[in-house]
Image (cartoon, rainbow, N blue to C red):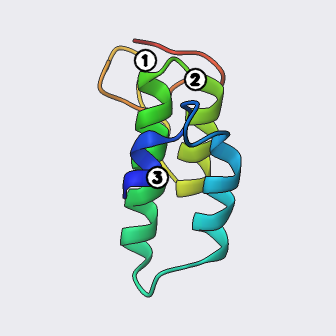
Amino acid sequence: MLCVQCCGNEKWGDWRPHLAVLLSNETGDPAVQQKAIVTMGDTLASKGLTHAAHVCYLTAGVSFGAFPQKAERLVLLGSSHR
């Protein structure tokens, strides 16, 4: 899980190849794969990369939430509601 927590920094480079690897190398458990992709999205969001985080959330099948709830990951595409 280290790669999903370090993506978006200079050492690990661009986040997109890491997401591609996660998507092309499915584990036996879809819940583990989804958790890894959501964690990658959370990491990218914490670094201010909202668009990148939203791509991860959409890929992982995260549901859209309500705007007033700040804990929601995905409310309005391309915009942070936090």
Q: Earlier in the sequence, mark 1 or mark 2?
A: 2
The image quadrant where one finds the C terminus is top left
Judge depth for marks 1 and 2 and give the one in front. 2
> How far apart, in angstroms, are the residues tagged by discs 1 and 2?
15 Å
**Image position of 10 (left or right of 2):** right
Residue 78 shows in the view? yes
Amino acid tagged 1: Phe
60 or 17: which is nearer to us? 17
Quarter of the image with the N terminus is: bottom left
Q: Residue at x 47, y 45 (%)?
A: 40
- Residue 63 visible in image: no
**With respect to residue 46, does 5 lie above or below?**
below
Query: Who comes first in sequence, dot 1 or dot 3?
Result: 3
**Is the residue 46 above or below the residue 42 in the image?**
above
Q: What residue appears at the point 37 percent right and 70 percent down from the top-left corner?
A: 32
Query: Mark 1 packing: few (<14 Cα in 10 Å), some, or many (20+)?
Result: some
Residue matched to label 3:
3
Looking at the rendered structure, the kind of residue marked 3 is Cys
- Three-letter residue code for mark 2: Thr
Please tell me the numbered disc located at residue 82.
Answer: none
Q: Secondary structure at mark 1?
A: loop
- Marks 1/2 in contact by CB < 8 Å: the verdict is no
Q: Quadrant of residue 33?
A: bottom left
Q: Residues within 10 Å of mark 3 (few under 14, many from 20)?
A: some
Say which mark, if any, is on residue 50.
2
Please give the name of the residue rendered at 42% of the width and 58% of the height, measured from the top-left corner.
36
Q: Which mark is residue 67?
A: 1
Horizontal relation, residue 82 to residue 20: left or right: left
Give the spatial CA distance, label 1 vs label 3: 30 Å
